[in-house]
Image (cartoon, grey):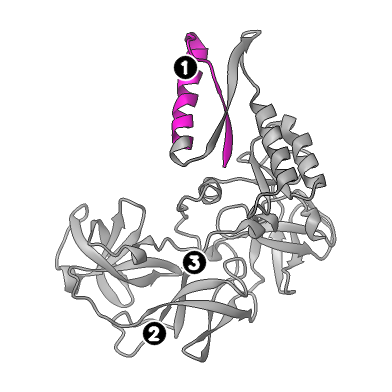
Amino acid sequence: MSVGIAFAPGTSGPLLAMHEENDKLADVARSYSWEVMEGLLRTEDGQVREKMTDTHCALKLAELAYERPAGIEAAVMLTRDHDLVPAAAFANSRGLPTYLASADPADTRPAPRFHLTVPTLRRVCGQAPTIDVDSLIARTEFLWDPGPHTWTVVGEGNLHRSSGWFLEHADGWRGFAASSEVGQVVAGQELVLISADVGFDGSVPVAWCWPTADTPGFDYIRDVKILRREDSKKVLAEVDEVDMRFTCQLGVAEKGQRVLVRLRRSGDPLKQDGAARLIGPLAKPSGSHLHDGRVASRWPTPLRVLKAQRGSVAEVVDGEGIPARLAASQIAKTFEAGGWYSGVLRPPDAHRSTRAPLFDAVSTRLMHLD
């Protein structure tokens, strides 16, 4: 990761304030071992302007396009500056797929571009993403570090036909503890628990917590590879040499990808419905996923438009021909027949389950997939 940051040491007033802000940003960037390309801040006609940062960024992109370091499959420029459009066009002409991304859905630059979200930025930068609880991609860090951790009681509820308490963790995890295990507690109370298992609040995985390390030792959690997609909702995987189908919406994970599932076993204390339930994908998008348009929150999917459409919703198919629907957005107001666009699956409760899954468009046309 390379970032252009402008400085104005030894100044005063607005320049000094911006310098100090950028200096803090540079410290954060260096803490992640990012390259900081230093530019200058100066005042012109009463306006604070940056100098040299665009040139640094353009030269860095040209360097990547010429040298193509191992492992670099695509370039994403996090900027809203039109000055960098020629650099992106040059890199594309050299065979390096390059995209301009910003958090502004009204961005109308004439180049391949994506709508960038905070979870996307964290994912592109290699940080653990903060996932919306409505997303089908689960936050499952608690499985790799079961604790004990300090949990805060949120309120009373029921999960898997067990009464108990919903919990939250300072890192954003959601949890649940059965009242038979922790007794009577009150909202706001802190509990030290082990996150030993996974339960499901609807389709959202939550940590199932126990008060001690003396937890059930059943083989519930498995890492499996998706063999094929059956339809827009179901996939097939092999578990212990047995074919097993489970719900995994189109746009969450696809053929060849590995996902984490929870299996139903004899003596299962959670009384799980279904032989297997999806916990979530295991990997963040790779460079090839960036290339294919997967650069937004959740797990964006390349979709091909069947019929030209302006506004509203277009009928589309994925790479395997499975039907879906793609809703227009500020960044993609029209769809061209035969064109590929990147779409993000809406939360399942936001569309009718009896119809093809509904995606929101988050990119302009992906010319390299046509």
In-front residue for pair 58/309: 58
319 versus 151 height, above or below: below
Q: Is residue 174 above or below residue 95?
A: below
Provide the residue designation for mark 2: 264
Work out whether mark 2 precedes mark 3 in sequence or the reverse, and give the earlier one.
2
Task: Give the SS element for disc 3.
Answer: loop
Which of the two labelled residues, at mark 2 and mark 1, occupies the earlier sequence position?
Answer: 1
The image shows residue 131 at horizontal and vertical percentages of: 47, 55
Q: Quadrant of the C terminus?
A: bottom right
* Residue at screen point 38% across, 61% down: 141
Q: Which residues are magenta?
A: 1-29
Q: Earlier in the sequence, mark 3 or mark 1?
A: 1
Is label 2 or label 3 in front? 3
Q: Neighbour class for label 3 at 10 Å: few (<14), some, many (≥20)? A: some
Is residue 345 part of the magenta span, yes or no? no
Q: Position of residue 19 (x, y in %)?
A: 49, 19
Q: Is residue 331 visible?
A: no
**Tag 3 residue:** 282
**SS under mark 2:** loop
Local SS, label 1: helix
Q: Would residue 301 appear left or right of 23 to someone viewing this image?
A: right
Q: Residues within 10 Å of mark 2 (few under 14, many from 20)?
A: many
Q: Report the residue marked by disc 1.
A: 17
Residue 345's disc is: none
